Image: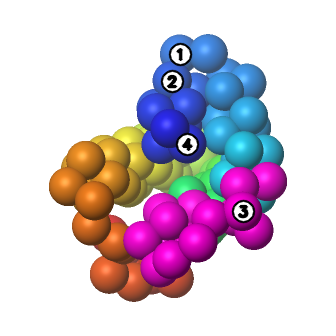
Amino acid sequence: MVSLLYIAGFVIGITGIVGLILAVVWRNEVAGTWGKSHLKFPIRTFVIGLVVGIIGAILSFVLIGTPFFLALSIWILVRSVIALLKAQKHESIADPNTWLF
């Protein structure tokens, strides 16, 4: 559900923040490694995305921020789709702490 909210955030901006809030609230309520990895992964996606987005905004002043925003969008989309596919198969995320996929 959190990953769907992140994907919807590309169209309706506020849903990404709603997804983060839900992931943080549900993080302590979920039992087992499967659920915990599926909540840690999107939380890290949001935090890393926020940091890269801030860097991209700063670099926009020197006109090189656009590639950062494009790469960030693709990165968030790929991580969200991977999380959805793993959730559909009831598989845990292998390494939810990773920066990549």
| Type of amino acid at the residue the image marks with label 2 | Ala
Picture residue at 59% right of the left edge, 48% below the top: 65
- Dot 4 lies on which element? helix
Q: Which mark is residue 2?
A: 4
Crowd class of label 2 (few under 14; some 14 to 19; many from 20; radius 10 Å): some
Where 52 sits versus 69, above or below?
below
Asked if residue 91 is positioned above or below residue 1 in the image, the reply reads: below
Residue beneath the point at 33% across and 46% down: 84
Which is more N-terminal, label 1 or label 3?
1
Pick the residue in front: 32 or 44: 32
For mark 1, what is the residue? 11
Q: What x and y, as percent, mark residue 20?
A: 71, 48
**Main SS of residues in magenta:** helix
Q: Secondary structure at mark 3?
A: loop
Amino acid at dot 3: Glu
Say left or right for 59 vs 58: left
* Mark closest to the chain's N terminus, 3 or 2: 2
- Residue at point 51%, 77% (across, down): 32
Name the quadrant containing residue 55: bottom right
Tag 2 residue = 8
Between label 3 and label 2, give the one nearer the viewer: 3
**Whole-number angstrom distance, CA of label 3 to CA of label 1:** 29 Å
The picture places residue 15, in percent across and down from the top left corner, at: 66, 27
| SS state under label 1 | loop
